[in-house]
Amino acid sequence: MAHTIVRPVPKVNLIPLQAPRLLRVFVFLALLLTVSLFFVWSRLQLVNLQYDISKEESRLREAHRQVRGLRLQAATLRHPGRIEDVATKQLALRNPTPEQVVYIKR
């Protein structure tokens, strides 16, 4: 019969050192990796969303600028002096004579 030598488990700071249970360690590491990857993914999504928001805000500012320009252009085109100028110079229209004016009674 072979003799088995039994040695006591070494202790560090009164904590016994035993062979780690590999399954628990792997499960813990897998969980840690999953949580870490989720954290990195969520941060990446946040950065991408902030970039998209910034881009859309820039487009909105540009649209507001265009609206202001178009309102100014519309006001300029509606000005009575401009309309009269276009009518006389480009369309060769003139003011009606008193005989051409027709009054409508209510």
Image (cartoon, helix red, strand yellow):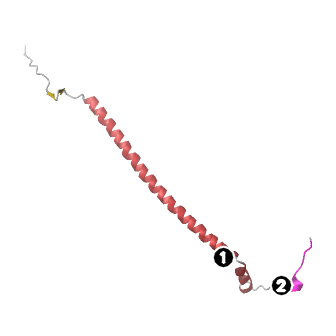
Task: For mark 2, give the secondary structure.
Answer: loop
Q: Which residue sits at x=52%, y=62%? A: 59
Q: Residue at x 68, y 76 (%)?
A: 77
In magenta stretch: residue 97:
yes
Which of discs 1 and 2 lies nearer the camera? The answer is: 1
Q: Which residue is mark 2?
A: 96
Relative to 4, is 75 above or below? below
Does label 1 or label 2 sit earlier along the sequence? Answer: 1
Predominant SS of the magenta segment: loop
Tell me which amino acid carries mark 1: Thr
How crowded pointer 1 is (Cα within 10 Å; few <14, some 14-19, many 20+) is rated as few
Q: Quadrant of the N terminus?
A: top left
x and y, in percent, of residue 91 in the image? 74, 83
Q: Give the camera-side residue of 51 and 80.
A: 80
Residue carrying label 1: 76
Q: Which residues are magenta?
A: 95-105
Magenta-colored stretch includes residue 70: no
Q: Secondary structure at mark 1?
A: helix
Graded by Cα atoms within 10 Å as few (under 14), some (14 to 19) or many (20 or more), the crowding at tag 2 reads few
Tell me which residue sits at (22%, 29%) in the image. 20
- Give the CA distance from mark 1 to mark 2: 25 Å
Quarter of the C terminus within the rendering: bottom right
